[in-house]
Image (cartoon, rainbow, N blue to C red):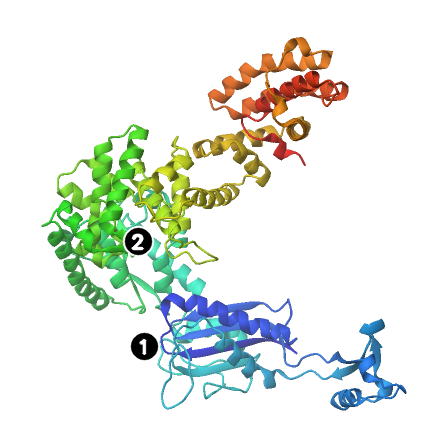
Amino acid sequence: MNETLLIELLTEELPPKSLERLSVAFADEVHAALREQAFADESSIITRFATPRRLAMTIKNVLAQQPDRTIERKGPSVAAALDAEGKPTKALEGFMRSAGVTFEQLQRSGEGKAEYFSARLEQRGKELDSCLADIVAQALKKLPVTKLMRWGGSEHQFVRPAHALTMLHGDRVVPGEIFGLQSGNVTRGHRFLSGEPITLPYADSYADIMESAGCVIPGFIRRRETIAKQLDQAAEKLDAIWIGHGAQQSMKELLLMSNAERAALSPLLDEVTALVEWPAVYVGEFDAEFLEVPQECLILTMQQHQKYFPLLDGGGKLLNKFLIVSNMRVSNPAHIIGGNQRVVRPRLSDARFFFDQDRKHPLESRVEKLGSVVYHNKLGTQLQRTERIATLAGTIARLLGADKADAELAARLSKADLLTDMVGEFPELQGIMGRYYALHDGEDQVVADAIEAHYRPRFAGDALPEGALACSVALADKLDTLLGIYGIGQIPSGDKDPFGLRRNALGVLRILIETPLNLPLPALLKTAAENFPAGMLGANVAGDVEGFVLDRLRGYLRERGFEVQHIEAVFQVLDGRLHEALPRLHGVRAFAALAGAKDLAAANKRVQNIMRKNREELGSGLGDTTVKPDLLKEAPERDLYQAIQEIGPFAQGYLDRGDYGQNLKALVTLKPFIDDFFDKVMVMCEDQALRLNRAALLGQLGKLMNQTADISRLAV
């Protein structure tokens, strides 16, 4: 009999940040066990439920009893099962007793030395009642819980005390005991809005009854959507937008997002969804005088401490209003709003106090104190690190045509805000507060902006630093981290990357590629490595880090939709000029779509093979590789030489202008000359002078064909 199965464990309030993860793991474990034991199959649809006080699920099409099955039990090998007279050995007799079969009922399987006896047994399907409690208990033991609790006088352990267990198959209670709780069909609704116990008559009716009788929206996703809709409606009435992303998100990006995009990216929305069962959104307000404090501080204060949603106007400016997600829907929420407004005031006062106190001491006065802060016991203090970053930032700024002194100043001040009270309270404000304090100290805007931007990009999709000065400091910071941490052997492995080297590598790549900046990667790494005291890092650290960064580059380019063959073709000629990677790849992609591209790629591969064979056979005997026109005896080689002389300047012009697609497209006109040459001319001839001259001709051809990329890599 197929019915819907309902399982619900009622508990004390579960950890909000892991609620959804616990729900998914619980439901998946139960569902997998039911399918493994043939109580369910691919048609059994699972629906997960999770609230602060319950983990639950419904699974459709669950059988009350497993189907009867024929199973095969493997016994001993024939060699071990029969003695010299062909009679059963003790090993076979023991197998027959355990399987409950006679010798005549056994079957032989396998062949030769692998032949063995087996028994086919009819197994009656078990009832769900005898298995479900154990399935649920095992699933609960496997949940990703770091710390377990005991409650009352029992020895039972779970992430929170459990109070009730529901296991309902259709309209029938499945008996069982977990955590000392006997299963039933009675649960409880909202802690305050639903007083009486709720009887669940059918498994299918769970969600509807919990909402109508229990004032609980049990589905996590549906509850999240309900909250997001209420947030949107409340914000629209105030002509504002709500934010739940933290202070690091670019306000420009937030303003461009739709409501749905903001909701999808909001970790705060996930957290409050895990804190309420019957959500209601109300508008709170704080004194406008607090807006004198940087809005990033106020945003984090409201989000982290109170779980409020700050509001921005159309220009990205913080309003003195915020949205409260309450667990109580009431007709008159005045006491809820008033209570939250009273609570938020001292929090905002603390933020204002930190801001006022920090501004009493300029950033410059904090720099020397970084000497007492250890960055890493093998890499020195934060002050020593700051000095390295300043030196490197100045060098990069000079290469980019930015003011070297400004870059060194911004880098010198970049870590000073780590010693401020505000950053001590909110580490997420590193750099952001440095900018505010630098402006208060009278530093130039470009220096202050570079202090804030040197952490960018902080995460995938984050905005890049803008301007040569900011890019100089940001690159210096990331390169120092990469060379230093990698150089002392702290190399990422698997999913472990405690120092964020992959993130820093991707940051360097994005700045060089997307800005773009003409700064060869090998030279940058070599300069950064030389910044460290002699002997502090490994001798080959610059080369090793280059390989590490290029591996990240391959992944970065694949994520942008480029084919592996195209990427490797460009890598052969890129020589660390990462700012050329994207335009070269776009050129290769356009070239690969042309009709003659595959033939040219194959021809290029043939050229390279011939050149390699010449080098192997003649070695230093290759001598001068200049083509001698008077030695071009055959018409096809003269025609190819003439075509190269005519097309070469056009191809070089396209290359110089960065038009890589046209550079490769120009090669298509060479195809008939190349085909004719390979059909009629013997390169590896006996006459060494002719052979060397033809090799030189092919060398010119290969050089011309591989200006944008090594197109031989495109050959299948």
Instruction: Give how far apart the Cα atoms at labels 2 and 1 are.
Output: 31 Å
Whether residue 334 sits left or right of residue 259 in the image: it is left
Residue type indicated by callout 2: Gly
Residue 120's image quarter? bottom right
Taking the view exactly as shown, the residue that stands out farthest to the right is 85
Secondary element type, mark 1? loop
- Nearest to viewer (mark 2 / mark 1): 2
Tell me which residue sits at (54%, 87%) in the image.
175
- In the image, residue 418 lies at what x, y percent? 22, 52
- In the image, residue 309 lies at what x, y percent? 29, 57
Whether residue 488 sits left or right of residue 600 in the image: it is left
- In the image, 65 versus 314, the foreground residue is 65
- In the image, 491 versus 467, the foreground residue is 491
Q: Which mark is residue 192?
A: 1
Residue type indicated by callout 1: Phe
Q: Which mark is residue 179?
A: none
Q: Quadrant of the C terminus?
A: top right
- In the image, residue 360 lies at what x, y percent? 9, 50
**Residue under circle 2?**
246
Whether residue 148 sits left or right of residue 654 in the image: it is left
